[in-house]
Amino acid sequence: DQQVKQNSPSLSVQEGRISILNCDYTNSMFDYFLWYKKYPAEGPTFLISISSIKDKNEDGRFTVFLNKSAKHLSLHIVPSQPGDSAVYFCAASDGGSNYKLTFGKGTLLTVNP
Amino acid sequence: ETGVTQSPTHLIKTRGQQVTLRCSSQSGHNTVSWYQQALGQGPQFIFQYYREEENGRGNFPPRFSGLQFPNYSSELNVNALELDDSALYLCASSLESGGGPDYEQYFGPGTRLTVT
């Protein structure tokens, strides 16, 4: 049973436009959410996170929105750049004793010049 | 600041063999977590080590075991390898600062294990 779902396996966007990556979760105990970016042959790189007590967190071109009632979060990248092309993973944690991360399957973002 | 490093980068083993993967955590980090990423899937939590003891385990059988050393580096051992163990194994480090491990974990490049 997948607790974190990224229903779009891929997304293609034009350079300069907005990229919106979506993520849904089912576990209401999740209280912290993270986005990671992964290039081929590299490990996931931490991008941005949000606590469940917030509904928005912004860092430069990246903004994460959290809708707790809908159990939905999204990552907005604006403007998108070709270097943003990568697989993006949504991850969630319920804290607990080890703050383990539960990941979605990822969305491959392609930004076309 | 030194990032998370893992060795080896690639490994090919035969079914039934045993394998040891190694990880050095990011400088200043004292907690190490291991994840398995199968093809087309997201990383899946195997276990975490803190203060040289296992601190939580995912849905993996006992033939997956680990160690953490006083310098916070870690090993993942897998016995009796099966074909389904073929995956990218990721190590992630984080800092535990008294109130529990940090949510934010920093990953190494991974070890690609192929079992034939």
Image (cartoon, helix red, strand yellow):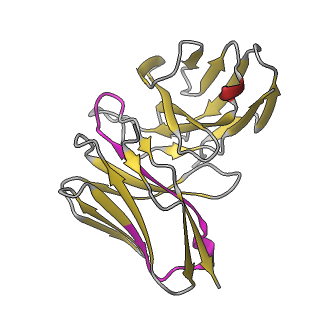
Residue at screen point 67% across, 13% down: B79
At x 21%, y 56%, the residue is A68
Give the extent of the magenta segment.
Answer: A75-98
Q: Where is residue A8 drawn, in percent x and y?
A: 48, 62
Quadrant containing the C terminus of chain B is top right
Q: Position of residue B87 (x, y in %)?
A: 67, 36
**Left or right: B29 with respect to A39?**
left
Instruction: Name above or below for residue B63 compared with residue A106.
Output: above
Horizontal side of B3 relative to A3 (left or right) equals right
Where, by quadrant of the figure, is residue B76 drawn? top right
Q: Percent from the top left, x then y, of residue A53?
A: 18, 55
Residue located at (29% from left, 37% from top): A95
Location of residue A11 (image quadrant) = bottom right
- Locate residue A57, reporting x and y percent: 30, 66
Task: Look at the picture and state if B30 lies above or below B61.
Answer: below
Is residue A37 highlighted in magenta? no
Q: How many marks?
A: 0
Based on the picture, tell me whether residue A77 belongs to the magenta stretch: yes
Q: Nearer the viewer, residue B58 or B29?
A: B58
